[in-house]
Image (cartoon, grey):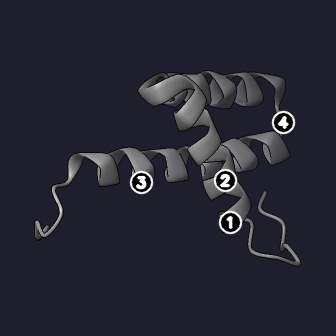
Amino acid sequence: MKHALAFDPTTYFRIVAETLLRNHGETALSYAEDALRKMRILGDDEGFELWSGIERQLFKKVRERHIPKGAMIH
């Protein structure tokens, strides 16, 4: 169940994603998948939401790394 937040956590998720990628490279994606799986098994909805946000930012950052500057995506 999603909770209304008093702030936009996207900046936090971006910082965590950047740190994970800096420290672990693209292996950070599998760490996020493992965390999501663990949160689901534990029934931790808040943890799942947090890791979902982090994973979205990880995918975004990895995708940005692989798109050449000036390339257009349709």
**Residue pointed to by mark 3:** 60
Task: From the top left corner, tell me how far across and down residue 36 is, in percent.
Answer: 65, 31
**Which residue appears at 80% of the width and 41% of the height?**
47
Q: Report if the CB atoms under discs 1 and 2 are less than 8 Å apart.
A: yes
Q: Determine the secondary structure under disc 3.
A: helix
Q: Pointer 4: what residue?
A: 44
- The CA distance from mark 1 to mark 2 is 6 Å
Quarter of the picture holding the C terminus: bottom left
The answer for how far apart the CA atoms under marks 1 and 3 are is: 13 Å
- Determine the residue positioned at 85% across, 73% down: 5
Residue type highlighted by circle 2: Ile
Q: Position of residue 43 (x, y in %)?
A: 82, 32
Query: Which of the two discs, 1 and 4, sits closer to the camera?
Result: 1
Residue at 11 percent across and 66 percent down: it is: 71
Location of residue 24 in the rendering, given as x and y in whole percent from the top left corner? 54, 24
Residue type at mark 1 is Thr
Mark 1 closeness class: few <14, some 14–19, many ≥20 residues within 10 Å: few
From the viewer's perspective, is the residue at label 3 or at label 4 nearer? 3
**Which residue is under mark 1?**
11
Three-letter amino acid code of the residue under disc 3:
Lys
